[in-house]
C-alpha cells in the first residue's frame, strides 16, 4: 500500500544504525586522524560529477531514505520527473531553494523548512529498482532489455521476516546531511515535486552513521559497539574501483561509474541484547565493547569473523549504515529500533548476496537481529550540469 502525503509527513521522523565493525584497525591512529581533520560540516558537496554524491562522500550525520513507485507507464513522465529531481537536488545541495516561497495566493514552490540552515553537506543519491525495468509480466517503460545483470532480485536469506510495505520500490532516494532538517527538507520537496508521477512506498529517517572515511572518528551503534573499523574508506581509490564502481562488461554503458545499492532494514531485539552479559555481547560481535579491539580468542560464530573479507573470497562492500528508531515494538514492548543497512558495490551477486548467505542465521548477532525490509537499486553514474540522472538510460528506451 502506498503512503499518502499526510502519512509521509507523519512518518518521516528521525531514525537508522550502522553495521557492526569488521576486522582490525588502529583505533588510536584513527582517533588522531579524526581529531586533526577539519571537515567543512556545513559546506557544499558538489552534486554534478563523474559519480553521484552520497556514495564516496564521507557519511554525514543524518539520513532520510525514500522508496517510491511510479504511477502509470509514461516514459515521458518518468524522464520529466528525473529532470525535475536533478535540478532540485543540485540547487538544494548548494543550500538554495528549489523555487519561490513568496507566491501569495498559491502554495510556495519550496516548502521552506531549510531556510537559513545552509547546505550542511547535503547529498542526494538516486537509484532504480528492478520493478522499474520489469514488473510482473509488464515492461511498463520499455526498459527491460536495459536492466543491468547485477540488478538481481535479492534471494531469501535465513531468518528473514520481510514486510512488503517496507521493501522494494521503483525508485530510491538516499538523502544525507549534517542537519536533520536539511535532510528532511530535501526528501520532502522531492516527494512533493513528483507526487503526481511517483508516490512514496516507504520512508525511514536515520542517525548515528557508519564511518567510511579516515577523517571520521569511529561512532558507536545502538548495541554500543564501535562501527566501521574495516569498512572500505572512501579515500582508497583502488578499493573503490575494485569493489564499488560499476564497470564493464558486466554492467551496461549507462551504469558504468555508478554503483549497486542494497538497503536492508534490520530490527534489533534491544531488550534481549540489554539482558545479555557483556561476555555474551562481545562474543557475538567478536570485539571488546570498551576499547574496540578484537577478542583474543574469537568464537567461530563471531560476526566480524564471518563477515570479514578473508572469509568471503576477498570481497568487500562500502557501508553507509544508519541507526533508526520507530516507536514501540507491539510484541515485545521494547523500542522498535535497529539498523538501516546501506551498502554499495560493483556486483551484488559477488558481494552482498554471498556474504549475507554466509552470515544469515549463523553469526552470533542473528539471535538479536531480524531483517524486516529489503530493497536493491541501480544507482547510475553522476551527471554533468545540464543533464539529468539516468539520461543515458532514458534517452532511447
Image (tube, grey):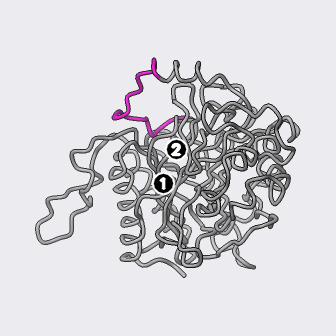
Q: Where is residue 316 in the image (x, y as percent from the top left)?
A: 76, 39
Residue in the image at 41% along x and 44% along y: 177
Main structural element of the magenta stretch: helix, strand or loop? loop
Q: Is residue 282 above or below residue 204?
A: above
Q: Position of residue 240 (x, y in %)?
A: 68, 32
Q: Which of 120 and 285 is in front in this view?
A: 285
Q: Position of residue 62 (x, y in %)?
A: 44, 48
Q: Which of 78 and 310 is in front in this view?
A: 310
The residue pinned by badge 1 equals 206
Cα–Cα gap, marks 2 and 1: 8 Å
The residue pinned by badge 2 equals 209
Q: What stretch is highlighted in magenta?
A: 35-50
- Secondary structure under tag 2 reads loop
Residue in the image at 52% along x and 34% along y: 58
Quadrant placement of the N terminus: bottom right
Q: Which of 209 and 191 is in front in this view?
A: 209
Position of 233 with respect to 83 (left or right) is right
Callout 1 crowding tier (Cα within 10 Å): few <14, some 14–19, many ≥20: many
Callout 2 crowding tier (Cα within 10 Å): few <14, some 14–19, many ≥20: many
Q: Is 290 one of the magenta-colored residues?
A: no
Amino acid at each position: 500500500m502506498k503512503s499518502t502525503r499526510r502519512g509521509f509527513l507523519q512518518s518521516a521522523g528521525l531514525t537508522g544504525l550502522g553495521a557492526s565493525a569488521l576486522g582490525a584497525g588502529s583505533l588510536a591512529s584513527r582517533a588522531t586522524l579524526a581529531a586533526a581533520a577539519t571537515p567543512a560540516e556545513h559546506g557544499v558537496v558538489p552534486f554534478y560529477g563523474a559519480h553521484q554524491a552520497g556514495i564516496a562522500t564521507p557519511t554525514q550525520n543524518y539520513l532520510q531514505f525514500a522508496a517510491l513507485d511510479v504511477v502509470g507507464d509514461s516514459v515521458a513522465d518518468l524522464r520529466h520527473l528525473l529532470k525535475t529531481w536533478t535540478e532540485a537536488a543540485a540547487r538544494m545541495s548548494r543550500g538554495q531553494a528549489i523555487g519561490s516561497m513568496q507566491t501569495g495566493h498559491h502554495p510556495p514552490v519550496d516548502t521552506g523548512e531549510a531556510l537559513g540552515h545552509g547546505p550542511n553537506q547535503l547529498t542526494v543519491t538516486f537509484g532504480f529498482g528492478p520493478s522499474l525495468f520489469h514488473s510482473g509480466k509488464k515492461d511498463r517503460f520499455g526498459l527491460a532489455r536495459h536492466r543491468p545483470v547485477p540488478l538481481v532480485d535479492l534471494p531469501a536469506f535465513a531468518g528473514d521476516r520481510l514486510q512488503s510495505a517496507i521493501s522494494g520500490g521503483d525508485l530510491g532516494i538516499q538523502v544525507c546531511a549534517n542537519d536533520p532538517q536539511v535532510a528532511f527538507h530535501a526528501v520532502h520537496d522531492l516527494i512533493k515535486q513528483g507526487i503526481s508521477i511517483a508516490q512514496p512506498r516507504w520512508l525511514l529517517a536515520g542517525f548515528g552513521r557508519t564511518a567510511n572515511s579516515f577523517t571520521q572518528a569511529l561512532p558507536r551503534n545502538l548495541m554500543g559497539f564501535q562501527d566501521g573499523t574495516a569498512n572500505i574508506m572512501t579515500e582508497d581509490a583502488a578499493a573503490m574501483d575494485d569493489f564499488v564502481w560499476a564497470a564493464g562488461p558486466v554492467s551496461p554503458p549507462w551504469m558504468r561509474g555508478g554503483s549497486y545499492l542494497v538497503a536492508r532494514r534490520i530490527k534489533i531485539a534491544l531488550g534481549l541484547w540489554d539482558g545479555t552479559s557483556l561476555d555474551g555481547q562481545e562474543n557475538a560481535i567478536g570485539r571488546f565493547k570498551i576499547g574496540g579491539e578484537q577478542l583474543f580468542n574469537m568464537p567461530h560464530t563471531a560476526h566480524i569473523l564471518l563477515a570479514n573479507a578473508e572469509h568471503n573470497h576477498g570481497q568487500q562492500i562500502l557501508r553507509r549504515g544508519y541507526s533508526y528508531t520507530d516507536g514501540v515494538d507491539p510484541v515485545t514492548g521494547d523500542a522498535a529500533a535497529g539498523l538501516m543497512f546501506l551498502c554499495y558495490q560493483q556486483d551484488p551477486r559477488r558481494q552482498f548476496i554471498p556474504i549475507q548467505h554466509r552470515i544469515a542465521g549463523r553469526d552470533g548477532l542473528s539471535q538479536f537481529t531480524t531483517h524486516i525490509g529489503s530493497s536493491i537499486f541501480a544507482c547510475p553514474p553522476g551527471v554533468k550540469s545540464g543533464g539529468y540522472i539516468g539520461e543515458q538510460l532514458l534517452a532511447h528506451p
